Amino acid sequence: MSERALIVGAGLAGLFLALKLAPRRVTVLSQAPLGQASSSAWAQGGLAAALAPGDNPALHADDTVNAGAGLVDPAIAALIANEGPARVVDLVALGVPFDRTPDGALAQSLEAAHSRPRVVRVSGDLAGKAIMDALIAATRAAPHIEVIENARARALLQDGNGRVRGVLCDDGATFVADETILATGGVGGLYAVTTNPIEAMGQGFAMAARSGALIADAEFVQFHPTAIDIGRDPAPLATEALRGEGAHIVNGKGEAFVPDLAARDVVARAIHIERQAGRGAFLDAREAVGSKFPTHFPTVFAACMSAGIDPRLQPIPIAPAAHYHMGGIATDVWGRSSLAGLSAVGECASTGAHGANRLASNSLLEAVVFAHRIAARLRDDAPQSYLAPQPAAAPPTLPDSPRAELRQLMDANASVVREHAGLAHALDRVAALCDAHGRANALVAAHLILTAALARTESRGAHFRSDYPNGLPPQRTFIAGTALAPAAA
C-alpha cells in the first residue's frame, strides 16, 4: 500500500497543488529540471482576479462566459471568479512580487475581452517566471514533497478494477500511488508554430484516454494572435498586455484591420487572413510603450532585440501560434476524472471554465483554483488498501522525422482555419504514422483533436470551419477514452 499522492507535472498547477497538500506526502514528477519545459514559466500576462474597486467576481464570471462562445459552464466560471482573489493572496504569501500601484495596491492590467482591468502581473511580462520561482523555492523547502526530475511519464498504471495506481516512466521505472494527479500541460508542441515548450504534445490527456478516461472539447485549441514572427521554435510571445497599454495591430501599410482587444479567436483569424493575403501583420507599440519597453516589458523587448528588431522604433512582426488547449481530460468541480484514482489539473484538464475560447489570463487562475480544490479533497484522506497495479507497457516514442511531419500536418490542417478535406487528410496521415511507428502519445493526442474537429460541423470560438462558418446550438464534445489505435481509413 502507498499512502502517497503522485503529481505528474511540475508547472504552476502541479507545484501549487503539492504545496497545498501538506502535510500529506506527495511525489512530484518533472519531465525536466524544475522550471524548464513548463508553459507556466513563460506566461507573460499574469493571473486574472476581480480585486480592484469597481470590479467583482460576477463581472469576471460574465466575461468568462461571454468569451467562451456558449460552452463555458456558468457554475464553473462563477467558481473560479469567486475563489480567484483568495488564491492571489496565497501567491502573495508565497512571495510572488506582483506589481503594485504607488499606494501599495496590486496593479491590474486590461486584456482582451475583459470588461475591467483585473490581471495581476510582475514587471509587465514576467508573471509566469516570478510565480514559478516562488513556487519552486517553496517546493524545495517543503518536507512533505519529494521531487523527481527528468522523469517522463508514458502510461498510467491501473489495477484489476480499473483504478489508476500511478504511472510508468520512460526508463521503465514505476511510481505507485493511492491518488494520481495529471498536471502535464497542453498540446502546443503538436503544432509547427507554437508559444509552448515543444515537449508539450498532449501526453497527459493521451495517457488518460488510452486508459479509458472521458475527454472533453479536444477540438478547441487557442491560437495566440501575437506570437513574434522571427522564425524561432517555439515562437516568443508578445503579451496581450501590450494591447491593454494601447499598442495597435496593423498590416504592412500601417492600416488597422481588427479591434485590438477583441476576443483572441477573432484577432487570430483576422491576422491569419491578412497574412494569407500578403499584407503582413504587426504590433505597433511605438507610441503606447516606446522608451519604456526595457523596463515595462523586458521579455518582449529582449526577444525582439535578439532578432534585430527594436520595438521602440519598429512595429513587431506577428503571427498566430498554438498557445492553449481548452479541451482535455473531463473533470468535475473537484478535479476528478472519470477514472477512479485519477484527477487532472491545469491545461491538461477540461473543467468547463474556458469553453470554445479561453478568456485571457484565466489559465493560471483556473490552475490555482482547481489545485486548491483537489488538495482540499485529498489532503486528509485516510490511507486505504487497493489492489496492486497490473503490468503496463509504455507506448513507443515518436522519432524526430515523423514528429516534424506531425507538427507540419497539424499546422496546415488543424490550425486557425479548418475544413473537412484538410482535417480528413490529417486524420488519415496520423493513422498511417501510427501504422508505421506505433501509437505514440503524440499521435493519440493529435488523433483526438482531429476527430473532434472533424465531428464539429460548425464554427465556434477557436474552432473555425471555413466549410461551416455558422454556429449551431451550443454543445460540448465528449469522447469516451479508448485503448484502440487510430486506424487508417
Image: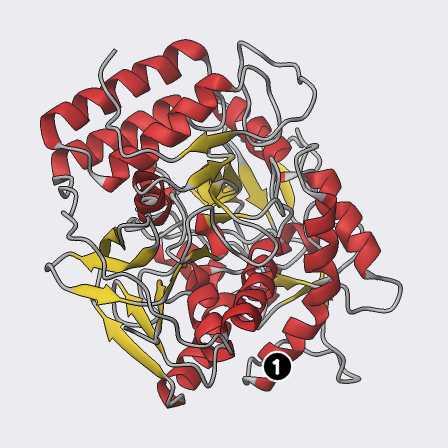
Q: Report if residue 259 is visible in the image.
A: yes
Decide: is 363 above or below 477: below
At horizontal 53% and vertical 57% (from top left) the residue drawn is 335
The picture quadrant where one finds residue 304 is bottom left
Q: Amino acid at mark 1?
A: Val
In which quadrant will I find the N terminus?
bottom left
The picture quadrant where one finds residue 127 is bottom right
Q: Which residue is under mark 1?
A: 92
Side of 225 relative to 167 (left or right) = right
Decide: is 69 above or below 278: below
In which quadrant will I find the C terminus?
top left
Secondary structure beneath disc 1? helix
Side of 413 relative to 397 (left or right) = right
At horizontal 48% and vertical 77% (from top left) the residue drawn is 21
Q: How is the image coloured?
A: secondary structure
Question: Front-most of 75 and 237?
Answer: 75
Question: Front-most of 368 and 279?
Answer: 368
Side of 308 relative to 394 (left or right) = right
x, y percent for residue 400: 13, 40
Q: Report if residue 361 is visible in the image.
A: no
x, y percent for residue 104: 75, 84
x, y percent for residue 112: 68, 46
At horizontal 65% and vertical 14% (from top left) the residue drawn is 470
At horizontal 68% and vertical 58% (from top left) the residue drawn is 80
Decide: is 65 above or below 486: below
Q: Residue furthest right?
A: 54
Side of 224 relative to 393 (left or right) = right
Question: Front-most of 18 and 50?
Answer: 18
